[in-house]
Image: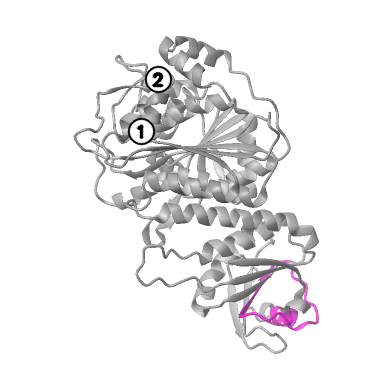
Amino acid sequence: MDFELKTLDAAGAASEKCDVLLVLVTDSFRAGKDPVSRLVAAALDAGDLEPKAGKLLQAYRSEGIAAPRVLLAGAGDGSGRKVQQAVQAAAGVLRSSAAKKLTILLPAASGGDAVRAAVCGTAESSYVYVATKSKPEGRELRKVTVGVADAGAQRGAFARAKAAAVGIEFARELANLPPNYATPTRLGEEAKKLAKASGFGVEVMGPKEVAKVGMGSFLSVAKGSAEPLRFIVLRYEGGSRGDAPIVLVGKGITFDTGGISIKPSGEMDEMKFDMGGAASVLGTFRALAELKPKVNVVGLIPSCENMPDGAAYKPGDILTSLSGQTIEVLNTDAEGRLILCDALTYAERFKPRAVVDIATLTGACVVALGGIRSGLFASDDQLATQLQAAGDAALDPCWRLPLDDEYAEGLKTNFADVANVAGRAAGAVVAAKFLQRFAQAYPWAHLDVAGTAWKGGAAKGGTGRPVGLLLEFLMAQDGAAPAAPKASAKASKAAKAAPANKRSKAAARA
């Protein structure tokens, strides 16, 4: 889809040649003498249109307006959130009209948040999955012009919005592919293609390389599948050579049966979305290619299937992680944390200034927050604040949940350093506490996107979240590159407690 930013007022919009003119009307609307303003004023006076976000009124062949169809949409106070609601409400009408050219007239006082909402909301609403359909119906909308009072003042916001839309769609497309297409091997290939096109560094490891590194926990999860695992390392180097990178770690379970602790069959098809974290990391890198901010970013994606064959790991097994910590498996359906823990340890070798992992980790987070906000856990208050602010700005919100040490009590076991699950209570927090054990050497945050990475029911499909949040967070780091943090005293103590062979192996590869 081709987006264009244009300086446009109501009078100019009247002469715009397009299939549909979408006019966003705020509760502070002031009528002018042009045809568009007269149409809006008449509709408001008659009570046929309310400026409340999401309210719509259609007009056809209006006098003095070049577009054959005019769609008036209430946009409330004109904020990004209200503009998003207006665009989403208009999506159904736009699809039925088969419009190829759309002009969106934003309110005169609109800021960058409204521009972003208009671009991303339109891209999201017009997305159509066609990859595996024999007779695909393509997206009709081809060109979207966003009209603002001063295009020059909104160039930066517009560029960021376009990049976010591209990255989100990239993530959605990967997540929506069926699991016999989007295998770990396919994710590795997509990473290589993206790296080649964008000038990123890339390394894709297979089972032998991962075994040599010592990722015993990750390897165990992959044992039950005929599909070979992949560990993907992407590097974007937009900052200075010595700048400590931000590391993004994405869970890449391309299909999750639950393993030996097998899931119920109902809606198991949706477990193809269990690589939503991996898709969001790849989508974020796709957006970075468009914007090229001055920041260094590393993407780590441990990817495999969780299957229940004769070689599969099982409840009662003891795994040895890359950190040297041993893990008792009590439930093989808590596999995401077992592949992420090795990736979090691997992240130490980049001496990162911060690490953010993204995972469709727990059903408990869906119970807690539904599909509105992603769950946020963080060991560092500043990092948490930055991620929350980024989510709010991107209309991709998250909510911080606690990490009190008491939540880890249920992970104690007689047979290993830690168990992979505890009881049912506070499941999302307990999972985060498990991951925190492996993320002591740097500021760390965990985004549980189990409720936000995809939708079920009639709207079933990947959402591309939290690409918007991650991109906004990274753009806020543009040019600001503090040195890598020192490991905490607690982390140093944990490292000393690890078996000597594991410490020496990690040190040799750091």
Q: Which mark is residue 207?
A: 1
Q: Quadrant of residue 474?
A: top right
Q: Quick one: SS at disc 2? A: helix
Q: Position of residue 209 (x, y in %)?
A: 40, 30
**485 left or right of 268?**
right
In x, y percent, where is residue 143?
61, 71
Report crowding for label 1: few under 14, some 14 to 19, many 20 or more residues within 10 A (C-alpha). Answer: some
Mark nearer the N terminus (2 vs 1): 1
Question: What residue is shown at x 66% (from left), y 81% (from top)?
Answer: 46
The spot of residue 397 in percent (x, y) is 57, 46
Is residue 34 rendered magenta in the image? yes
| Most foreground residue, 477 or 390 | 477
Label pair 2/1, CB-CB below 8 angstroms:
no
Mark pair 2, 1: CA separation: 33 Å
Residue 109 in the figure: left or right of residue 461: right
Q: Residue flagged by tag 1: what amino acid is it?
A: Pro
Q: Is residue 272 above or below residue 240?
A: below
Residue 467 appears in the picture as rendered: no
Q: Quick check: 91 left or right of 33? A: left
Q: Which residue is mark 2?
A: 409
Q: Nearer the viewer, residue 221 or 500?
A: 500
Residue 170 in view: yes
Residue 97 at x, y percent in the picture:
52, 79
Circle on res. 188: none
Decide: is 373 above or below 480. Answer: below
Queried whether the magenta region covers residue 361, the answer comes back as no
Q: Nearer the viewer, mark 2 or mark 1?
A: 1
- Tell me the quarter of the image containing the N terminus: bottom right
- Magenta residue span: 14-42
Identify the secondary structure beneath mark 1: helix
**Residue at 68 percent of width and 60 percent of height:** 115
